[in-house]
Amino acid sequence: MIWTPQSVLSREPYKVLLKRGEFIDSRRENRFVPYKIYYPSDYDQDIKAPVILWSHGFGGNRDGASFISRYIAAHGYVIVHMTHLGTDSSLWEGKEGHPWDILRKVKISRETTLNRMYDVPFVLDQLPIWAKENPEIEQIMDLGNIGMSGHSFGAMTTQVMAGMRFPREKDDLSDFRDERIKAGILYSPVPIGHITDEAPELVYGPISIPLLHMTGTQDDSPLEGFDYTHRLVVHEHSSHPEKYLHVLEEGDHMIYNGTRGKLGANPNREAHEEEIMVNSLAFWEGYLKDQDHALEYLKAQGL
C-alpha cells in the first residue's frame, strides 16, 4: 500500500465535534487548566482513536492551531488542547498595544514555566476520569496510545515531556519525562541555551521518543529575533534514532498557529498548511496507528 497526500485527501473525513471545560488541580492551589477537545463523530474504525495533547505558544491558548487539530481529528484521533495559565493570552488580552509588544516586556518566572510542565501529567491523569463522564468519547478513545505536540513554547513543553532535561528553580537539570507519551511533533522547536550552560548533548540527548521537528526558513523568533537555524539544535543533539526534520521553504513562525500576529499575509499559506497537515498525519499514522507505509512516505520526502 502506498501512502500519499492524494490518498489521504481523498478519504471521507469524520465530522469533528468539540468539548470545552476546565480541569482543577487541588494539589497546586486549585490551578485551572482549561481544555478544548476535538474528536471524530460516528467513529467506526476497528482500532480506537489515539489521543494527542496540544500545548500552545507564549501568549496563546487552547484555541490556537485549530486547522491542524480539526484535520487530524477528522482522520480518527482525539486531540486535547490545554491552556497554560501564566503564559497564555491573559497576559495581553484587554491591554493597550499589540500582543507581541506586550509579551516582549513580560518576565516569566521559572516557577511559572515549570507549572506548564506540571500541567501535562495532570491533564493525562484527569483524562480517564473525564472519559467516564463522557462515555460517547470514552468508547472510541485509546488512552494507552498517546502523542503530544505543541507550537513554540508548546514545542518546548513537548520536548521536556519527551525527555529533554530542563532546569528547576536552582538551575539543576531535571527529568520531567512522561512515559505515557509515545511520540511527538515539535512545531517551531525551542532550544534552551538562554537558561542553561550545560552541553547540548546533556540537555537534548536524553530525548527518548520519536519526534517530528517542523520549522521554516522564515521561522524567526517574534520575541527574541533568532532565525530558524537556531531551532535545529534540538534535532541535531537529540539522540533518539527515529527523528524527522521538516523545513518548510518560506515557512514562518505563525504558519503553525493559524494566525499572523505582526507578520504580513503569506501567499503560500494554503499550500503550507496542507503540507503541515499531511506530514503531521503521516507521522501520527506511523507512530500511533503502526502504519509503516506512512513512515515510508515521510522518509521518501527526505524528512
Image (tube, grey):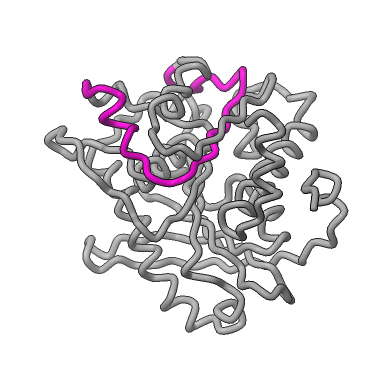
* Residue 33 % position (x, y): 39, 59
Q: Is residue 53 above or below residue 252?
A: below
Q: Where is the C terminus found, in terms of image quarters?
A: top right
Is 130 left, or right, of 119 in this rendering? Answer: right
Report if residue 16 lies within the magenta region: no
Q: Is residue 202 above or below residue 179?
A: above
Is 48 left, or right, of 109 in this rendering? Answer: right
Which residue is at a point 38% across and 34% down the rendered structure image? 239
Work out whether residue 101 or residue 46 is closer to the camera in this orientation and state it: 46
Is 139 left, or right, of 56 in this rendering? Answer: right
Work out whether residue 299 or residue 129 is closer to the camera in this orientation and state it: 299
Which residue is at a point 23% across and 38% down the rendered structure image? 110
Could you say which quadrant of the image residue 134 lies in?
bottom right
The span picked out in magenta is 197-224
Q: Is residue 17 visible?
A: yes
* Residue 1 % position (x, y): 80, 53
* Residue 269 % position (x, y): 75, 31
